[in-house]
Image (tube, grey):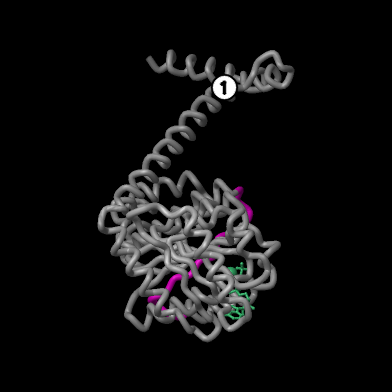
Amino acid sequence: VLTEIERLVEGVLNSDRRSIARCLSLVENNPSEAERVISLLYQHTGNSQTVGITGPPGSGKSTLIDKLVKELRRRGKTIGVVAVDPSSPFTGGAFLGDRIRMQELSVDEGVFIRSMATRNNLGGLAKATKDAVRVLDASGKDVVLVETVGAGQSEVEIVKVASTVVVVLAPGLGDEIQAIKAGMMEIGDIFVVNKADKDNVDKAVIDIKAMLGLNQKKGGWVPPVLRTKALSGEGVSELLEKITEHTKYLKGGALRRKLLGRVEVELVEAIRSRVAERVIDDLREEGRLDEFLQKILEKKLDPYSAADVLLAEKLKKSE
Ligand SMILES: Nc1nc2c(ncn2[C@@H]2O[C@H](COP(=O)(O)OP(=O)(O)OP(=O)(O)O)[C@@H](O)[C@H]2O)c(=O)[nH]1
Ligand SMILES: [Mg+2]
């Protein structure tokens, strides 16, 4: 007999929409159940092409994704989209538009769109996003697109769930300056100057190329700078060609290195959170947590020494 979680996982693997939706809700709202689901799905992941779309608020990311999805559908691909919106104050205006677009696309069986809630802290959101991508990947989508607003460093981190990162900028508005600040120059594999129907496009392209020249590594992938008009769809198929080119480049060896680095970070994170949880649970059970907190507050103990003491205790107990 299958457990409920096993049935859910089987549904996802069969690309059942309802199972995917339920699984994504778990990932978002129930971290411990989510870990069980991901454990079961894990061996079925890694087959999708994952593409992060990031950039300053309002640069046209959602409009571009809408056009990318339509073009990919024309090419017979199935698609998952995760829209992360950790900074809703910026995006208030665009959200309704996104919703309408999403409804339109979600009638299509080959497309699954999910927007992630904003109530999580950024760390939790990053983890939930990574797992959401895994769910869509395991469900058999050919391509998974992730939209994040690149407004701050931690938001930029989120997009690292993707193998290919597309940075979408728009002319004017000092976006270029914003981009350096947020570290977008380092994470972009492909740069897009959207709203190419506007003035100052050439200047934006030149600026970005100049900045890229500064931190370019020899022998690696040279990030192209493209122009798009997301509203009309102009430049979208060129963007898809570049994404495919980048995927091919990654398969030449760079992907394994990239993924090994990420797997290490993830393993360290998982150990860290489990150890912390166990130590704190013990303390709480024994009714000693408050005592430790008070001591630290009263400067009788510092947090680092407290951690050393508690870890030593825990290790001794488990001998
Ligand atoms: N002129 C022009 N406007 C565009 C173009 N692409 C998008 N826009 C407009 O720019 C505004 C923002 O577009 P969105 O696609 O919502 O931008 P976004 O980057 O997803 O925005 P956030 O998610 O809020 O960060 C909308 O009013 C779009 O219609 C374009 O190529 N040219
Ligand atoms: Mg958007």
Q: Crowding at label 1, few (<14), some or many (≥20) Cα neighbours within 10 Å?
A: some
Q: Hey, which residue is sitting farthest left in the picture?
A: 252
Q: Which residue is painted at 55% across and 61% down in the image?
A: 148
Q: Nearer the viewer, residue 231 or 318?
A: 231
Q: Nearer the viewer, residue 19 or 74?
A: 74
Q: Which residue is painted at 62% across and 20% down in the image?
A: 287
Q: Reply yes or no: does residue 119 show up in magenta.
A: yes
| Residue stretch rendered in magenta on the structure | 107-121
Could one spot residue 91 in this view of the protein?
yes
Residue 119 located left or right of residue 308: right
The C terminus appears in which quarter of the rendering? top left
Q: Tell me the SS state at disc 1.
A: helix
**Quadrant of the image where one finds ligand 1:** bottom right
Could one spot residue 1 in this view of the protein?
no
Q: Reply yes or no: does residue 178 show up in magenta.
A: no
Q: Which residue is painted at 50% across and 52% down in the image?
A: 128
The amino acid pointed to by label 1 is Leu
Tell me which secondary structure the magenta stretch mostly adopts. Answer: loop
Q: Which residue is painted at 49% across and 83% down in the image?
A: 233
> Could you say where residue 89 lies in the image, as x and y percent from the top left?
70, 62
For mark 1, what is the residue? 283
Instruction: Count the marks.
Output: 1
